Image: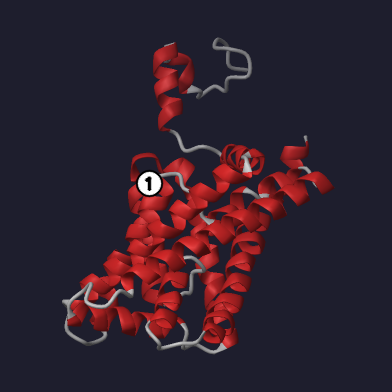
């Protein structure tokens, strides 16, 4: 048996040679365990569910408006690029802008809440938590959509942008409502999955938070995966521009996208990341 060191320390436990300041420094540079990430995000979810409806609405409205910059930046970059298969790859970083503003600005976005606001319900499965989740989702989603519609209406003002930019806006908006129902829904699952994974990764990203946000949302952009808030600006713009009807917005975009994003965030991230930790959390 090895002697010396603190109780429970193994024979090769180098931490016993560190002073308290060095141990703190080592802990700060180590990646948090999954259960710690779960607890960080669950507490965020608890705060979201306890937030007053008015505060949630204004934060959600700000997020919806901010997401409009993903559409605008994408069109601005795309308008300056030649047509071809590389256009989507080169213009994709513009799509990340709205997500950077919303996530780093701590604004309420519906697809984030498919992870954070669901975790309290998975831990505490009672009627009160379920009702709080439904109320929160209703407020934040309606506020997000209202913000996207306002932003789209501003973009649709005649003469606001030169011809090439307006043509790029029209082209991107047309793509948002052009897909068949089930392919759109399935691709939306990937979008909800990636955005919820992004939120799961952020607590351990530290100084790389910006890189994580841009990398995962860039994949959403180049994959053409429909996102309920970013895509709502595009689909609403198509309606205001006369290229789509309200029915196209609802049936061609909104319904399949909200189904897919919610399934991707709740089923494939919240549930799958919670399930392995459930016994430890119960203990």
Q: Residue at image x 62%, y 65%? A: 262
In depth, the one of 204 and 151 nearer the eye is 151
**Horizontally, is 52 left or right of 175 in the view?**
right
Q: Percent from the top left, x then y, of residue 234?
A: 41, 75
In depth, the one of 170 and 230 nearer the eye is 170
User: Dot 1: what SS?
Assistant: helix
Q: Is residue 129 visible?
A: yes
Q: Percent from the top left, x then y, of residue 22?
A: 39, 18
**Horizontally, is 46 left or right of 221 in the view?**
right
Quadrant housing the C terminus:
top right
The quadrant holding residue 196 is: bottom right
Q: Residue at image x 56%, y 41%? A: 37
**Horizontally, is 156 left or right of 166 in the view?**
right
Q: Residue at image x 43%, y 28%? A: 28
Q: Percent from the top left, x then y, of residue 175?
A: 40, 84
**Disc 1 target residue:** 209
């Amino acid at each position: 048996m090895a002697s010396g060191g603190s109780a429970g320390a193994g024979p090769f436990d180098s931490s016993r040679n560190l002073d308290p300041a060095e141990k703190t420094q080592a802990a700060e540079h180590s990646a948090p365990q999954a259960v710690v990430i779960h607890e960080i995000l669950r507490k965020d979810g608890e705060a979201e569910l306890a937030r007053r409806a008015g505060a949630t609405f204004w934060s959600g409205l700000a997020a919806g408006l901010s997401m409009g910059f993903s559409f605008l930046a994408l069109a601005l970059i795309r308008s300056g690029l030649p047509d071809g298969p590389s256009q989507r790859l080169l213009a994709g970083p513009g799509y990340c802008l709205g997500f950077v503003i919303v996530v780093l600005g701590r604004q309420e976005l519906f697809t984030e809440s498919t992870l954070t606001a669901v975790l309290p319900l998975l831990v505490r499965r009672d009627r009160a938590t379920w009702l709080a989740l439904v109320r929160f989702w209703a407020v934040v989603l309606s506020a997000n959509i209202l913000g996207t519609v306002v932003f789209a209406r501003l973009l649709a003002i005649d003469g606001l942008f030169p011809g090439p930019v307006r043509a790029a806006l029209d082209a991107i908006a047309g793509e948002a409502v052009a897909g068949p129902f089930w392919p759109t829904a399935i691709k939306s699952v990937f979008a909800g999955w990636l955005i919820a994974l992004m939120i799961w990764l952020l607590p351990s990203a530290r100084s790389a938070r910006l890189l994580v946000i841009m990398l995962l949302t860039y994949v959403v952009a180049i994959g053409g995966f429909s996102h309920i808030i970013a895509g709502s600006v595009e689909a609403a713009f198509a309606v205001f521009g006369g290229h789509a009807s309200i029915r196209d917005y609802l049936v061609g975009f909104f319904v399949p996208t909200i189904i897919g994003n919610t399934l991707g965030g709740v089923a494939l991230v919240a549930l799958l990341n919670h399930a392995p930790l459930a016994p430890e959390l119960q203990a």
